[in-house]
Image (cartoon, coloured by chain):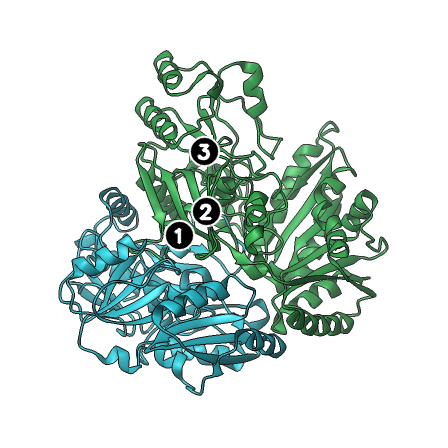
Chain colours: A green, B cyan
Amino acid sequence: MIADPQFLAGLRSILGGDSLIEEQEELTAYECDGLSAHRTIPMLVALPETVEQVQQILKLCYQHKVPVVARGAGTGLSGGAQPLENGLLLSLARFNRILDIDADNRCATVQPGVRNLAISEAAKPYGLYYAPDPSSQIACTIGGNVAENSGGVHCLKYGLTVHNVRKLRVICIDGEMLTIGSDALDTPGYDLLALMNGSEGLLGIIVEVTVNLLPIPPTARVMLAAFDDAENAGKAVSDIIASGIIPAGLEMMDNLAIRAAEDFVHAGYPKDAAAILLCELDGTDEEVSHEIEKVEQILQQHHCTATRLSENEEQRMQLWAGRKSAFPAVGRLAPDYYCMDGTIPRHQLPEVLRRINALSQQYELAIANVFHAGDGNLHPLILYDANEGDQLQRAEKLGSKILQLCVEVGGSITGEHGVGSEKIDEMCIQFKPLELQQFHAIKAAFDEHGLLNPGKAVPELHRCAELGAMHVHNGELPFPELERF
Amino acid sequence: MTLQQQITEAYASATPLSICGGSSKQFLGNPVAGEALSTTEQRGVINYQPDELVMTVRSGTPLLEVKEILAAQHQRLAFEPPSFGKSATIGGTFACGISGPSRPWAGSARDSLLGCTIINGRGEQLHFGGEVIKNVAGYDATRLMVGAFGTLGLIMDVSFRVLPVPATEITLSFSVDAAQAVTSVVAWSQKPLPISAAAWLDGELLLRLSGAEAAIRSAQLQLGGEVSKQRDFWLQLREQQLDFFQSVKPLWRLSLPMAADPLDIPGEQLIEWGGAQRWLLTDEKAEAVRQAATSAGGHATCFRNAQENDIFSPLSKPMLTLQQRLKKSFDPKGILNPGRIYTEL
């Protein structure tokens, strides 16, 4: 779409030549994020370098009523940074400086375009690190992590992004800068810090982040346990938690995922196992040895067929290598895969596994299962071939069924990837119209004209009403209070 | 009439409501002029599965009851909330968002909360979050309720994370001045030590260690100090039962960056949270206390014996405007606890 000449002239006066992308070919590079099935060429891309530029850009967008989509590294998996054809894509990639490591207050202040892993690398000389570790941590940015409230392997023990962010500087749609949170542990008034985490770029543009740092645990060891029955593995997970141990990470992979990972990185996984668990314990040497003993006992009680314990850091990294490369590994099994992100109460795991299997057979598409089992976060990977008949449509339908299943057993449609453009329809399953209306009202308190990332995260009620007609449950119309056209 | 019906009626007639649970924290915040609306009938555990580490409880359930049920399963609330009396409810605990001695190491009240059902100022019953630890669907309206003092919605039930009770706990004592106490805890906090609380009062630093016995023994060797015999210190600190808190002077709570320098302001101090929470008894003017807190990077609340209204540090103009708009989005007629935090909210 062609930009309004006045708006374009305004942008040009704010940004230097190489900070504004107008050419179709270059715009194409920004057409999608990690959800490559959803693509749109943005009207323009801005790459500001200063906070003042961001403020001026937003003021200009506000004045011309041009929608704005923020983007970090573009690694998000839910289309949160999918551009709008009539909108400006605001890349924060050039905000890549670490501003301060304050060891005494155990925090780091960084610009939003700093990569997640770079924070831990910068904090390492102080014996500190940043705990949340999404699997894309080499590439994903902290600004994006806050926008999505990202998780990772270690959030069972150390929390999500929301638990590890202390302060934000945010530019509102009218260009005003707000400091949300503080260098202390709390602030008076409403907890806007909680609200900003996971708000998917709909409430404001983050231009600075202060995160908590933690002491690096002196010891971390990972135990691999193989099972010939995935249900036993699921029960072992519940019992480990019930025993009072909070592992640093507790992951599960099913046979298809194990085989894919093993063929890809040769981590030494038993390819004949129905499921494996990876249980990481960290802390002091004494704590870890004590907990390993307890965990091993529980694993034996649940008939694990083999265990292996990392004896050094190299072995630990190797055991994790398979899990961390599970997505690309599965990607080699089929031309395309679709990664889901539901959460369920842990005790529902065996039942949900059974039903995912049944759905896989019903839709005739293979599914590899990778779980953050400790916190009930499932990542079923649906294998398909977009060039093969209706496989893409079937994959999307199957994915939606899995998310419905998660809600049905008391879970959520997204644990850590966000709603974005991907799960907007499933929001209608998880929330009632009044709740969605409240979300829209919150949005309007920050952005009355709906210019920040419009159309993402929270569906319009009429969209749910139209969908609702397709999901009649027990003969009840899901939205009886809405008029039908 | 149900709570929802009462709020719906109040909405229709624009009648302000004063929400209360056990009234144990009425001293905190401005008085609310409104019809009383009590949550104490809204009682009972809805769901508790110890191996899920999650509990869902109706808001009027007494906090002590919740703690007892958890203790029977060797579990507890990680943020160690104070009760300030037997009548405290779990709903009020989250609405006021006060966390105990473990806060800097184990997280706050809002960090523990996973989901809630509320009734907003339009009388609409809404459910946010859930019983799972990871959930990023929709805005985090759940945690927004913590510290909102019921001004955004009446909390009907809450789901929160619970944790196992640590196997062992000991308290070490060190004779040091205030500055040395903060410096020591700041240095120790950068090391992987099982610290779970730290407080300084009257020339004594008390440091609590929690975790596996072996880990505590090895930390004790590293840290030195004497094992403290004060058995109930942390409980008395949390519940403000220590002699320090029995004063009639205004009691200020200063929330500061942990490593902030000692405050240069007359009065008696009790330093908690390793320096991040400092209690101050002083007759100094509110303005002077607030100034000291702000210049140290934090804020000050007049926690008890306030001489004037507006006990919380004022918000900047743009921040207040935004918070007013947010309040309106939940409570367009301003009927829920109006003025409890700020007159404008």
Looking at the picture, which amino acid does disc 3 mark? Gly
Q: Where does residue A266 sit, x and y in percent of width and height?
A: 82, 48
Q: Name the amino acid type tagged 1.
A: Ala
Regarding mark 3 in the picture, which secondary structure is present there?
Answer: loop
> Which of the labelled discs sits on residue A16, or is there none?
none
Residue B226, given in percent of the width and then of the height, sits at: 48, 83
Give residue A458's quadrant in the image: top left
Front position in the image: A110 or A68: A110
Residue contact at pointers 3 and 1, CB within 8 angstroms: no
Q: B25 left or right of A100?
A: left
Q: Are marks 1 and 2 on the same chain?
A: yes
What is the x, y in percent for residue A432? 43, 49
Query: Which mark is drawn over residue A455?
Result: 3
Marks 1/2 in contact by CB < 8 Å: the verdict is yes
- The answer as to whether the residues below labels 3 and 2 share one chain is no
Indicate the chain on which mark 1 is placed: B
Q: CA distance from mark 3 to mark 1?
A: 19 Å
Tell me the CA gap for discs 3 and 2. Answer: 13 Å
Which residue occupies the foreground of this view, A353 or A246?
A246
Looking at the picture, tell me which residue is in the foreground, B191 or B79. Answer: B191
Name the amino acid, label 2: Gly
Callout 2 crowding tier (Cα within 10 Å): few <14, some 14–19, many ≥20: many
Residue at 45 percent across and 33 percent down: it is: A455
Closer mark to the observer between disc 3 and disc 1: 1
Residue with the mark numbered 1: B141
Left or right: A251 in relation to B146: right
Q: Where does label 2 land, which residue?
A: B138
Name, please, the residue furthest toward the top. Answer: A5
> What chain is tagged by disc 2?
B
Q: Position of residue A55 (x, y in %)?
A: 35, 30
Q: Is residue B218 left or right of residue A452?
A: right
